[in-house]
Image: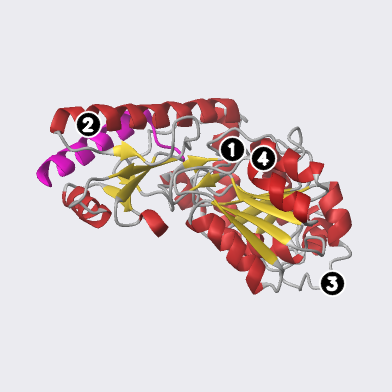
Amino acid sequence: MTTDKDGAAPPAASPPTFGSFFLPGPTAVRHEVLAAMTRPMIAHRGRDFERMFARIQTGLGAVFKTTRPVFVSSSSATGLMEAAIRCAPEGPVLALVNGAFSERFAHISRACGRDTTVIDIPVGHVPSPDDLAAPMRARRYAVVTVVHSETSTGALADVRAISDAAHAHGALCLVDSVTGLGGAPLHTDDGGFDFVLTGSQKALAMPPGLAFAVASAEYMRTAAGAPNRGLYFDLVEFEEYARKNQTPNTPALSLLYALDEQLQWIVRETMEARWTRHAAMAEATHAWVDACAERIGVPVGVLARAGARSPTVTAVTLPAGITGARVQQAVAERGMTVGGGYGAAKEYTFRIGHMGDHTLDELEVCLATCEDALAGLR
């Protein structure tokens, strides 16, 4: 967002025209944000870059609700998942797995040579502090991994409760909030979180290719002694450079231009309004599922249990004989894009990504299209 020569804000932009794209990531991106990527290059060690990075830090601080430095990585969120493991304190890792992306966190831990124990949670459910109790009484774990919003199932975990339980047993807690942050309430500092990460292409409504994270002072104290934290994802170096409004390595400059632009839109809306909008879209989707089943006689449902549903993505269950791929194709034939099923629920679900800069009015069109597609598959 720019200002005119008198410093006044420009007129409000027209509503986004991406109302046909409801993939659960990457999500639709404002034209103004895409256009920002065409700006000329600047020196990434120069003053102009440092001024932009300072604005980015301020904006991301508002998103994460933190006063800590926010790490900006030119990678997917998977990169910062690996960084979180590599820079975590030595010792066994307890991975809470309730879907495909929490399993990815566990896989990364194992791939980094960490002694990893997996606690399997049924698909569509979320972990609770009780899931940690027995294993953590039996053994000392250094780290717990958990996913906030499980993109494959649309389940939303109470990561504050999980983090508190991990701390009670002397472990740090690493939180993947890739489809949570920006759409679901999360207060990094007030929640006492050790490490929270996200990606650019989900609820922040950015192009893919950037990842962001905040680490607590305690996490960074232990990271300084981590023996195998590597080079590219050395979070100690990330923090050192972030405090100078720089990045350790050459950044994806065009994506940072887009980030600078989008953060100003987000801050202008406010995080509280953004959370409210996402909650309203989720509620509308859940209500539609119930009503749709009655109207067209197709027994669809919401995979995630009530009380633990993500405000950014809904996995819709399907009856025998209708696959997620068939629904996705039928919706595409009607000019709309939704996601197919993923992971263990791939065959019997499809997913609607109601996140980013979408509105209720746009979502209603998507839901009507999905209903028409389902009616045609009876």
Mark 4 and mark 1 residues within 8 Å of each other at the beta carbon: no
* 185 on left or right of 356: right
Compare residues 211 and 175 and report the one nearer the observer.
175
Which residue does the image show at 54% across and 25% down from the upper left? 273
State the residue position of label 1.
264
Which of the marked residues, 2 or 1, is nearer the chain's N terminus? 1
Quadrant holding the N terminus: top right
Q: Distance between the residues labelled 4 and 1?
A: 37 Å
Residue 59, x across and y down, in percent: 66, 40
Where on the picture, by quarter, is residue 90? Answer: bottom right
Mark 4 and mark 3 residues within 8 Å of each other at the beta carbon: no
Q: Which mark is residue 292?
A: 2
Q: Is the magenta stretch mostly helix, strand or loop?
A: helix
Amino acid residing under circle 1: Gln
Mark 2 and mark 4 residues within 8 Å of each other at the beta carbon: no
Bounds of the magenta segment: 356-378
Above or below for 315 versus 89: above
State the residue position of label 4.
129
State the residue position of label 3.
227
Amino acid residing under circle 4: Pro
